[in-house]
Image (cartoon, grey):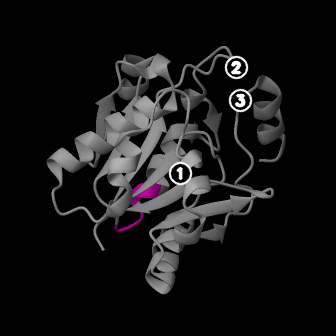
Amino acid sequence: MKTGIIILAAGNSSRLGRPKQLLNYKGKTLLQGVINEALETNCEPVIVVLGANAKEISSQHQNDQINFVINENWENGMASSIVAGLSTLIKNNSKIESIIIAVADQAFIKMSNFNNLIEKQKETGKNIIASAYDETMGTPVLFKKDYFEVLLSLKGAEGAKNILKQYPLDLETVAFEHGGIDIDTETDYNNLISQQ
């Protein structure tokens, strides 16, 4: 199954007051950590969607193995980043069969989180495989191409979570320990650093 990864990293980190994509964790940026784990998989391409602070972020993450997509409409919300990433991916990779959507601020993500989604899909035949943590579902999440049109029609602040709610019968989950830990505030970041 040919699977691409789209890492959403376009937000302006308004609650944090500085680009969270560039926060240092274990000697690298949060975004670099996610990129590294994505590149350890057999998935390709790996696309990173940037928006706010795109120039600054891309200059610190130059890598021949990843493709940057600039979402000029990042202020419209997460849907626009999913659409920007997916439409670029489809245009350049006609044989793609599924995608995994990830975000830049899940500090505990590992290659195994991506691979577990793919394995669960093969095992169950379901077309959506989400990560489960803290009594919720979320990223990283795998969608088979049956759902590309639905993803491309997302609008505004809605992420892919709405799709998970709409198609419960075509959905399976995989546990992601510490998946609920993301970085939105200075307190979140300080808590993360204190656990290193």
Q: Secondary structure at mark 1?
A: helix
Q: Residues within 10 Å of mark 1 (few under 14, many from 20)?
A: some
Q: Secondary structure at mark 3?
A: loop
- Three-letter amino acid code of the residue under disc 3: Asp
Left or right: 146, with 181 as reference point:
left
Which residue position holds label 1? 163
The residue range painted magenta reads 38-42
Q: Secondary structure at mark 2?
A: loop
Which residue position holds label 3? 184
Return the residue nearer the eye: 53 or 75: 75
Disc on res. 42: none
Disc on res. 16: 2
Single out the mark in the foreground, 1 or 3: 1
**For residue 92, above or below residue 169:** above
Q: Position of residue 145 (x, y in %)?
A: 32, 61
Q: Position of residue 161 (x, y in %)?
A: 59, 47
